[in-house]
Amino acid sequence: MYNVVRTSELRARGVQSRCIRDAIGCCLLALTQGMYSIVVRCSNPRHSAIAEFVTDEAWIKRIAELTDQQSGLLRFELLDMFEKLRVASYPHYGVDDVIWRVSAGFIHDFQLFRPPRGKVFIAHPTRRHSSADVVRTSKSVPEADVVRIGKMSLTSPIRTAFDLIGQLGEPEGFAALETCLRRSVFGSDAGADEAARFGYPPDTQALAERRIAEDFMPVLLRLSKGQSRAQRLLSAVGPLSESYAESRFKYNLAQLRLTGFRQQTRIWDGRAFLTRVDFLHRESRTIVLVDGFSKYADNGVRLVRKEVRQYNRLLELGYRIVRLNFNEVINLEECATKLFGQAPHLRAFIAPRQRSGVR
């Protein structure tokens, strides 16, 4: 599967180290020391012995589909798949090793912005070690926060999301927590997509609050440090963000202390349903649309025309609309500048700053 092959297997077929080094970047992807994936059926005669190890043609086809044929650039989806394969194929896990942090995040299919790549992050009760392939940290993970997938022991999705706060920062941890809650409420990514397509049940928020109390809070209380920050982020998490970008905007709202926005709100034109919007501030009649441009490429010109009509009708109904692209959403200052620049009346809904002892 995935054409994973070991150095020992290659050498047993007469493939020398020089040939292996030459094939890396051509038909071989180096995963960790001594582990490779064959990613191309190579036409180089010097690599013919390597091509004999190809057993998964679908993997090679998938890589070709996710690679820009002109520039050779790989889509982020493919880069994440490489990291999952790196983690899953690492051959030297010990009995007490637990995969955690971003490595567990890749296995749990979290959407992450520019995550560290190329190493496997492992927690171990007593050992600490770093190499070109592995970062092993001395850390005990409660058994209740460990799941097992195949040969791997790794932190649970919720525990991983909390751990990402410390490794990658609050925005990434917040987005991961929202992903976990969304999956918990709707059962899976597919279930969440179906709810988005056909309408969210009226008890969605109540179910989310129950999931937080039953599934998230016990994990939070087992954290050895960072509970206060984790609690603050968890208090703002919801199940309605339909993309990483929407989660990042919701995090920005919390940072800006901007109150009154509701997600996935249905807008009516008289008695007729008009559209559902990403974020609505009903009191000020302000709509925020977040990074929806990829869906136009997926659904074609008809959707563009439909949304133009809806956009114009919303303006006629007196709504102010702010569009934020991905780059604006992931930069808090750019997001705030555009949001308050186009909707300055929103400043009236900024909550008072809570005093703390930290300056």
Image (cartoon, rainbow, N blue to C red):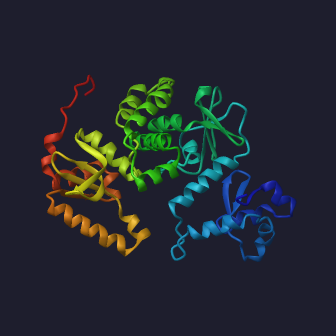
Residue shown at 55% from the left, 55% from the top:
80
- Image location of residue 272, percent across then percent down: 25, 59
Left or right of 190 on screen, residue 270: left
- Image location of residue 323, percent across then percent down: 26, 59
Residue shown at 52% from the left, 43% from the top:
187
Q: How many marks?
A: 0
- Quarter of the picture holding the C terminus: top left
| Quadrant of res 270 | bottom left
Extreme front residue here?
Answer: 271
- Image location of residue 7, percent across then percent down: 78, 56
Is residue 140 in view from this perspective?
no
Q: Is residue 57 above or below residue 203?
A: below
Is residue 312 in view from this perspective?
yes
Residue shown at 50% from the left, 35% from the top:
163
Q: Please name whichever residue, 320 or 155, is drawn nearer the observer in this view of the structure.
A: 320
Q: Please name whichever residue, 135 or 154, is drawn nearer the observer in this view of the structure.
A: 154
Left or right of 14 on screen, residue 227: left
| Quadrant of res 26 | bottom right
- Image location of residue 1, percent across then percent down: 73, 57
